[in-house]
Amino acid sequence: MKPKQFDLRTQKLVICLGPGGVGKTTISAALAVHGAAIGCAVDVMTVDPAPRLLDALGLAPDSSEPVEVELDDLLPSRRGDANRARLRALRLDPKRTFDSIVGRYAKSNAARDAILENRIYRNLSGALAGVADYMAMEKLLELAANPDTDLIVLDTPPATEAIDFLDAPRRLLELLNSRAINLLSAPGGLFKSQLKMMDVAARAVLAAFDRVTGLKLLSDVQSFVRSFDGMYEGFSARAARAQDKLRASDTAIVIVTTAESSRIAQAREFIDALESAGLHVSAMVVNRVLADLPDAAELVSADISPSLRRKLRKNLTDYAALKTREQASLSALRDSLPAGAALIVAHDLGREPRTIADLAEIGRNLRAG
Amino acid sequence: MTLPRVLFVTGKGGTGKSTVAAALALALSRRRPTTLGDLDRRMSAAALLGTIPQDSTAVKVTDQLDVIALTPRAELEAFIERIVPIRAISRRMLRSRTFGYVTAALPGLEAFLLLEKLRILAGTAALEDRYLVIDAPASGSAIELLSVSSGVKGIAPAGTLNRLADSIDGFLSDPTRFGVVITMTPEDLAVREALETAAIIRDRLGIATVAAIMNCVPDSLFDTSELAAMSPLGAHAQLAIRRNAAHEQASLATPRFKNAGLPTINLPMMFTPSIGRTELEKLGRVMKAELLGR
């Protein structure tokens, strides 16, 4: 199978997904820097709670609005279309974004305050059904509406399930619109006759839970969801637009992994989950692949001491073993790629990427694997 | 060093948590009976030992070592079955979509119940004089998990749940019962994240940290004069520099952790085409010698 090519110029949106610790943030930043270097106006956004991308891009940790990144001589010469080229970076603060969206859709200031001051919302809104993921989608729509932007690269939080992130808007909506919520927001005991046994039981569990725990959680959950009443329409319309965006032809879903066998297995599960949700994976980026090893024959003629030659041979043998491990995982991956997905290899720099120039180098050297 | 009953292994993604947890469990099992509890949905630590447990029923690896799977979902189900004694109803509820939304509206409950399960397992382990090694989630999620009981105390100022949260807090903050092992690799980001994680776990959560494990440390094969002599050798020299740089990075990290009051254990880089039982045994021996003495 001939892997598809992957061209940044034809994309409007690139979403990087992947397990933690594979360098997703680095790859997102490298793609963004490279995009700007080839002449695009790029925004890159991270939802990662650790502000690593901003670290690499040299930005303050609280940049919730796009901040221009200094690219100096990395930008193409400023002629014609090329003067569009720029890079802006931002870090999403899910809580703040959620607060502002609640403010936008709440029927009244009182309804807004009821939500913002709710015990559940205050203590645990971060843990509530993918709020952070949903907020990333919201911000994405806002950025995408800017006609001066050619490309948006999104660095998602590390996930165990690929679909969690992309599915967040739908899940939040289902939660707000579910029978459970209607049931919870109904005043106690009123509609019992209309409720199915399951609902009665669900409610009974919550009530029992409250009794056992002294939590009064039921009433808090009730008032929390009741305050969302009437906001559903606004949320719903935006979630639908987010879903459309994900399936647009100029949106690329990119899965980032490393060549470790456990990560590859995880990445393959990601692909399966996405495909079964009808979402197409455009490319798989395998990060930190060892560059090709030098030729041992070069050591024979080199003007070095025998002991150093022995050590260099040992070093080569050692890394060759790691390379063998890596190649085995890569070929397994190649065999299982979905049709039309590109396999891209990002070579290890041999050092940690710390500067914009490092990121540009990684972006420039992405190769078909 | 006296080890806590439960060793909770966390660290930045990709630093080898599962490998370290599996190797540690294997090594400790030479001293006392040991259980490896896998919190990872893919059971990667258990898989390294050649078994995939389905639930919290122990699966034997050797006479002294078994593995169990710990899932928040299973704990939630057990909890619901306790409070809804009619089995037909509890079963149907657990299967219903509606109920999924209800649990989504009770954030942190699953994590809370998982901690309670760990507390109970630690009690059993104490009676059987057994170690419990946990392959935990990556540091960010692990911190969330370990903070859940204080979150619960915030929203449940009184009652049974508050008392339960108290006993979980007591368990987590008792250094004889619970301790955290943090994994990292010789890379700046991983080292920084390990230091931050250690500080949060110890200072903010009041939970003991046992050791920081530096995974994948190559020996320094070349001395300074050799590195200078090989500079015309291009890619060969680069490969040598890479190896020495990783070694150097690990040496520089050790005093930083020492200052933070946390011992580090360096695990050798396994230059092998695969990681199997032999490699795990080797890594485990290094950790056991450092943690328990020879």
Image: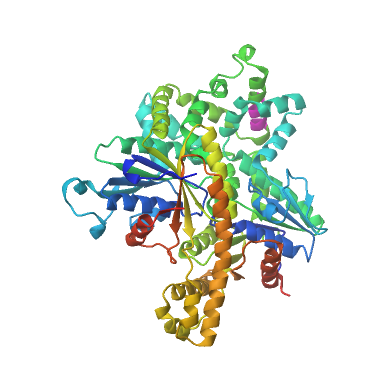
Residue B242's place in the image compared with B63, above or below, is below
Q: Residue furthest top?
A: A193
Which of B264/B18 is in front? B18
Task: Give the residues drawn in magenta, as a range.
Answer: A204-211
Residue A104's place in the image compared with B221, above or below, is above
Q: Is residue A94 left or right of residue A63?
A: right
At x 66%, y 47%, the residue is B115
Q: Residue furthest bottom?
A: A305
**Main SS category, magenta section:** helix
Instruction: Specify whether residue B154 is in view.
Output: no
What x and y, as percent, mark residue B99?
Answer: 62, 28
Which of B124/B165 is in front? B124
Instruction: Specify whether residue B177 is in view.
Output: yes
Q: Is residue B267 left or right of residue A14?
A: right
Q: Is residue A208 one of those drawn in magenta?
A: yes
At x 52%, y 61%, the residue is B194
What x and y, as percent, mark residue B212?
Answer: 58, 65
At x 41%, y 53%, the residue is A27
